[in-house]
Amino acid sequence: MKNIVVACGSGVATSQTVASKINNMLEDDGINAKVEAVDIKSLDNIIDTVDVYVSIMSAEKNMIIYQQ
């Protein structure tokens, strides 16, 4: 089973909606995958365990968050 993570700033409304739509599309095509919505700050802890990362934030915002 593939692991897909959808990330946005808070991991709530937008990422949940997109994750649900991706999950429905995969189910319709008979693809077995786990789709999870997370906040962007959680990526550091899980990025190495996922097969696909979907960002709903602009690249500039992602870069700002990852600069530590």
Image: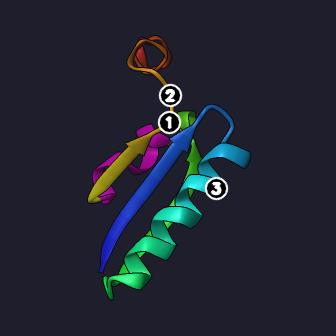
x%, y% of residue 37?
Answer: 57, 55
Kind of residue at badge 3:
Thr
- Residue name at image x 55 percent, y 33 percent: 41
For label 3, the residue is 17
Asked if residue 12 shows in the view, the reply is no
Q: Foreground: 59 or 22?
A: 22
Q: Foreground: 49 or 37?
A: 37
Q: Earlier in the sequence, mark 1 or mark 3?
A: 3
Quarter-wise, where is residue 9 in the image? top right
User: Magenta span has 45?
Assistant: yes
Asked if residue 51 shows in the view, the reply is yes
| Secondary structure of the residue carrying numbered label 2 | loop
Q: Are circles 2 and 1 on residues that touch, CB within 8 Å?
A: yes
Q: Earlier in the sequence, mark 2 or mark 3?
A: 3
Instruction: Please give the range of residues in magenta.
Output: 43-50
Q: Quadrant of the N terminus?
A: bottom left
